[in-house]
Image (spheres, rainbow, N blue to C red):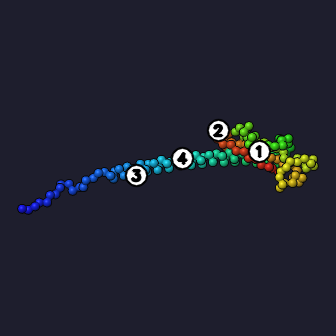
Amino acid sequence: MATEKRRSRSPRPHQSGAVLYVALIMLLLLALLGISGMQVASMQEKMASNYRQSDVAFQNAEGYVREREKAIKAAASSVSVDSTACAFDALAWARTIGSTQTVYVRRLICDATTGTSSNLGATVDASSVGSAYEVTSLAPDDKSSPTATAVVQTVYIP
């Protein structure tokens, strides 16, 4: 009697589909990683836009200050200045003005011959300066729809 070896018609081993589950979990993790990456990129874009708007507002305010300094240098008598204010808070002034572009000029040191002067600090001698002006400017980034404003305050000695 010869024994016959039994051969099965399908030599495949029994499969349970574990690879499919692992692949689906990996796809889910990759999708979560992609979503979080999109959120980070969106937040960085918003931060860059805010930085640009505040930088444009600062450049506008500085430009207005430089224009007023040129006007003071050209004809100091025709520029309206406030010689009466002893103390000036630029931020409080900016809050009352709002978001419109404006410039405020205040005389810090009067003519040295009168003997009246304001304190500019230890580095500036009031008797040798003559007149000095505190120029404060408030400017928005965009006049039609402002989203950021900046205040620039300088001391100008012509």
Residue named by callout 2: 145
The label shown at residue 26 is 3
The label shown at residue 136 is 1
Left or right side of 121 for 23: left
Q: Residues within 10 Å of mark 3 (few under 14, many from 20)?
A: few
Which one is earlier in the sequence, the residue at label 1 or at label 3?
A: 3
Q: CA distance from mark 1 to mark 4?
A: 36 Å
Q: CA distance from mark 2 to mark 1?
A: 22 Å
Q: Say whether marks 1 and 3 touch (CB < 8 Å).
A: no
Which one is earlier in the sequence, the residue at label 4 or at label 2?
A: 4
Residues 88 and 78: in front is 88
Residues 145 and 112: in front is 112
Instruction: Find residue 92 and report its horizontal and vertical position in percent.
Output: 75, 40
Residue 64 seen anywhere in this rendered image of the structure: no
Q: Residues within 10 Å of mark 4 (few under 14, many from 20)?
A: few
Residue 86 seen anywhere in this rendered image of the structure: yes
Type of amino acid at the residue the image marks with label 4: Ser
The label shown at residue 42 is 4
Type of amino acid at the residue the image marks with label 1: Thr
Q: Residue furthest left?
A: 1
Secondary structure of residue under mark 1:
strand
Secondary structure of residue under mark 4:
helix
Q: CA distance from mark 3 to mark 2?
A: 46 Å
The label shown at residue 71 is none
